[in-house]
Image (cartoon, coloured by chain):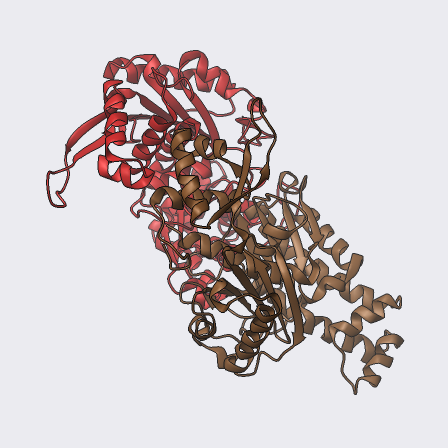
Chain colours: A brown, B red
Amino acid sequence: MVPVFPTVLTPQQTKIIRMLWRNGRVSRMDIARTTGWSRAKVSIEVSALIEKGLMEEIGEGQSLGGRRPQILSINSRLGYLIGMDIGATSIDIALANIHGEILAKHSEPADVRDAPEDVLGRCITLGKEFLLEKNIHTKQILAIGVGVPGPVDFSAGVLVAPPLMPLWEKYPIRTFLRTAFPQAVVVVDNDVNIMAIGEMHAGALNNLQHFIFVKVGTGIGSGIVSSGTLHRGADGCAGDIGHICIDKNGPLCRCGNLGCLEAVAAGPAIADYAMQAAIGGKSSILERRMNANGGRLTAVDVQAAMREGDRAAVEIIQTSGRLIGEALASLVNFFNPSHIFLGGGVSNLGNPFLSAIRQAVLQRSLPLATRRLVIEYSSLANEAGIHGAVHLALDHLLERIE
Amino acid sequence: MVPVFPTVLTPQQTKIIRMLWRNGRVSRMDIARTTGWSRAKVSIEVSALIEKGLMEEIGEGQSLGGRRPQILSINSRLGYLIGMDIGATSIDIALANIHGEILAKHSEPADVRDAPEDVLGRCITLGKEFLLEKNIHTKQILAIGVGVPGPVDFSAGVLVAPPLMPLWEKYPIRTFLRTAFPQAVVVVDNDVNIMAIGEMHAGALNNLQHFIFVKVGTGIGSGIVSSGTLHRGADGCAGDIGHICIDKNGPLCRCGNLGCLEAVAAGPAIADYAMQAAIGGKSSILERRMNANGGRLTAVDVQAAMREGDRAAVEIIQTSGRLIGEALASLVNFFNPSHIFLGGGVSNLGNPFLSAIRQAVLQRSLPLATRRLVIEYSSLANEAGIHGAVHLALDHLLERIE
């Protein structure tokens, strides 16, 4: 047991608590069925847990003949969770109840190149504001999940050689946050993994077993779910698809190799293609925007030009989609997911992008792997990460209860 | 409960049986600790299981102060398992005890293009010979695991559009084998998945969580293990890496696409490169073998030429290895395995092949994913499949005990 609970539990009680949390709402009969204990024994243990304030009866369920069963749930007043989704240029933070339901959230701009004390200090301030507002005590925060835009050594909870945020290298995020929330377990993961976790628990579809969440922004990464569990891989770096080779003779990537997916299809590549189109006289809309921006263009300009009906912009977006689709085609053959969800900065690239990805996957993947494959933007849009941070916290809390 | 046991179990007894099987050898104290039951209750249930002949005491364990605990195990006389590894040109069959340890095995040539009744009929004959030899009754065969060289719909237990064995399309393998072994549950999977399962349970390294088993032969396929479980994917076709695109302008593959890994690097491609070398006057050794073979060459000739020190043969093998390594590099970034094991017909291609694969992976994968990555021939050589077929049977039997 971690010291998150105000009391010591017997192994039997721990077992009930774990079961209840995962399933949400269960009856004493459900507990008896799963554990193999007698009904008398279940009743004794449940009463003890209710008395200790860990569990509560929340109403009556359907009768299966005889008295209606009381439905049991974890006591909602037991504690709370905080999720923090730290992006390259923003902070998203949420307060959630013990079931992972978000009670309050807040977003604001931030610069992750700043020192971790500054960014995390701001997160603490925002978290404490939630507590004041909701009249919650610091000690009631049982777990904090943090997503960061860089490679994370998951077991140590630190960033390793993060390109966007060099000041965070090996910074003890967990220790720093625990100074403010001493009762909380803190868990840190990368931004794409928390998006996949968010999709798994809060997405439009329940109980997906095998899917890939692809984030396309300044870089390209993915979070992988296998058998309903996030697949982190042997060193915690699974999902790093941005440096898959797409074109052996392609442009130089920041990793030092040629023709990486990221180098030919992510935000900066889209901006480069746009600059070429503007300078080459292929798009008056892009040229106008370039001149208005002081000679520069970003992926946002290409999106805007596409919405104005610019042909060159649509082609650029289709090119990016096709290249991403070609990389995904290999992964579809290998992993056979039921769904691929797209998120990140590209969530606004609309149908031309999605269609180009789908076409490339269909063309290069095996029929058996694509006959039921769904490729779609995440239904959570920009909130996959914050939901994921909350559920990462909850999962970690449950794992610690042994 | 499936009817594999001669008796009906209580849920408590089922729980103990499952626990015992997975862990091999446990004490009553271990059972009490895991289940949360009192020692008195555990003793009662264990006594009942011993009396029913399901469990046995196999000796004393280490004392932790006080009396030495009795070590419990599944009763070895409870029943047996059969594994069948059906290859394109061979049958491997094994009899194993209830723990998955092989007691007898046999290999012989076969032609999988024959009717399934013929090939499976021969497997039944061979299985019955084991039983006679070991004085085992047909009813004692509790489970049969079958590996076949083609795409399998795992839940239905049938082959779907198998290129090598069209007569087997949707053939009811399970029903056919159960006519001979009516007490057995039968489970069917493809050849590479059973190789991965074999590596997991019988390979040189224990408890590997994330690895890929790559089979290179006439085709190229892989079996994937994530978190210690075979990853079959949403449609059961995960691991199909033979049709990953390696070269958009490459040769036509039998799947209809251009430049698939299989088309440029598997056995037939190796044979093609050898023919070109022989005809082009680049290798007198290959030319001699080609003339001796009536104008044809296979991958086996290239292996032989390599052993004779033929430069062109070494280059061909290195080319195949490099192309396979380039495909694996993407999968290493995506999946972050701790190990890649190689098996199948290429297990004799030696160091030039392995080195070329390793070099290509190291060059194109991310440092974090390769710093501890091991790429090696399977220690089980040609026996990964048969071990896997046995453990597939055992796993399936355990899953059925509810």
Of A385 and B47, the residue lying toward us: B47
Picture quadrant of residue B395: top left
- Is B170 positioned to the left or the right of A295 in the image? left
Percent coordinates x, y for residue A314 in the rendering? 82, 64
Percent coordinates x, y for residue B335 in the rendering? 49, 55
Of A351 and B400, the residue lying toward us: B400
Of B306 and B16, the residue lying toward us: B16
Instruction: Identify the residue at image location x=55%, y=64%.
Output: A82
Percent coordinates x, y for residue A333 in the rendering? 58, 46
Of B82 and A85, the residue lying toward us: A85
Instruction: Identify the residue at image location x=28%, y=36%.
Output: B31
Picture quadrant of residue B164: top right
- Residue A309 lies, with reference to residue B34, above or below; the image says below
- Residue A384 lies, with reference to residue B147, above or below; the image says below
- Is B174 positioned to the left or the right of A196 in the image? left
Residue B317 seen from this side: yes
- Residue B285 lies, with reference to residue B133, above or below; the image says below
Location of the C terminus of chain B (image quadrant): top left
Percent coordinates x, y for residue A189 in the rendering? 50, 64
Residue B27 seen from this side: no
Location of the N terminus of chain B (image quadrant): top left
Instruction: Identify the residue at image location x=45%, y=20%.
Output: B119
Instruction: Identify the residue at image location x=60%, y=44%.
Output: A208
Picture quadrant of residue A170: bottom left
Residue that sits furthest to the bottom in the current view: A294
Q: How many marks?
A: 0
